[in-house]
Amino acid sequence: MSGDRIYPDEATGGFAAPPLSFEDREGREVEIRAFEPKELDAVSEMYADFDPADRAQGIPPTGEDRIEGWLSTLVEEGLNVVAWHGERAAGHATLVPDAENGETYELAIFVLQEYQEAGIGSRMMECLLGHGEAEGVERVWLTVERWNRAAVSLYEKMGFETSNAESFELEMSLRLH
Amino acid sequence: MRRALVVVDGQESTKELVREAGELAAGVEAELLLLHVTSEQEFADREEALANIAGFDATYGIEQAKEGATQFAREVGRESLSDGVDFEAIGRIGNEVNEILTAAEDRDCDHVFVQGRQRSPTGKALFGDRAQKVALDFEGPVTILTA
């Protein structure tokens, strides 16, 4: 939230841009593509199925209206990728610009419960960062709950570094260019 | 508490903060000041957007922006407080934390109310460093609403 967020000196680039097709660890054919407006309903449905126990820091919101309002902001303002298992959205990741300057982007990622722990999250991160890199995004940040070791490890694997450990939430950042 | 400063922002939760502060202030007959700060960036964006509207010849400057911020604080006050509760609306332009501290000092406020939770661009609820900085730098009690 602050304007003086710290970013790594070195850029971490070379991420694969979408689309990306692969077989996940459960043997499912998954394709990650940049979001298209006509896919909004399918992504809304994914969030309607989202287990409230997996919500973090208040998102995704609950209830159809709130999900739609929240999602419309993400797709109108941000860069988005969606992981598809056939017609079904299995995951969604987003980069949303900061209102303050529009040069830095916050990252958030969601994988539907039954598709978790199958390697989809890390490939979606890769595609989202590749998408951002191609679109000229320079700096990316995120916050994560401290206890969420799995998420922190994934972010570190992608090149994120801890930029602020003083707040309740751990803040991490990455430079793409 | 003699004079309370309440920080009003654009989030829905700001109304609850104003209501709570209003009740506490009324209980001890303290004065109530509602402050809204427009950031320099918001001001510059607005100025640029208006300048790009063909045929828009009214002036938009610091004074108009301050008046806009004051108007915003006034509207939130009217919506959140019951009729008959007196308050004064203040608008300022600049860095939010600095303006909060300066306004509190200028107006000799002895208590600041600020919303602790803020929404990040992706909608995450964050504790945020605004409340933390105000709490550390204001020389008096700061009430932080985190609901």
Image (spheres, coloured by chain):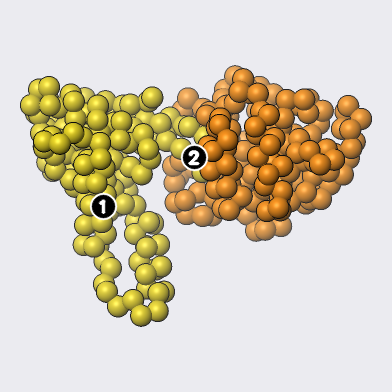
Chain colours: A orange, B yellow
Viewer-closest of A152 and B85: B85
Which residue is depicted at the point 64% across and 51% down? Answer: A79
Q: Position of residue A33 (x, y in %)?
A: 78, 49
Residue B69 circle label: 1
Query: Left of A23 or right of it: where is A46?
Result: left
Q: Position of residue A97 (x, y in %)?
A: 54, 50
- Looking at the image, which residue sits at the far bottom? B55
In this rendering, does residue A105 appear at all?
Answer: no
Residue B120 circle label: 2
Query: Left of A59 or right of it: where is B60?
Result: left
Q: Position of residue A49 (x, y in %)?
A: 68, 29
Q: Quadrant of residue A86?
A: top right
Which residue is depicted at the point 54% across and 38% down? Answer: A65
Q: Earlier in the sequence, mark 1 or mark 2?
A: 1
Viewer-closest of A154 and A131: A131
Which residue is depicted at the point 33% across and 32% down? Answer: B115
Q: Is residue A168 above or below residue B31?
A: above
Residue type, mark 2 in image: Ser
Residue type, mark 1 in image: Ala
Q: CA distance from mark 1 to mark 2?
A: 22 Å
Query: Left of A114 or right of it: where is B66?
Result: left
Q: Quadrant of residue A177?
A: bottom right
Q: Quadrant of residue B44?
A: bottom left
Q: What chain does mark 1 sit on? A: B
Element under label 2? Answer: loop
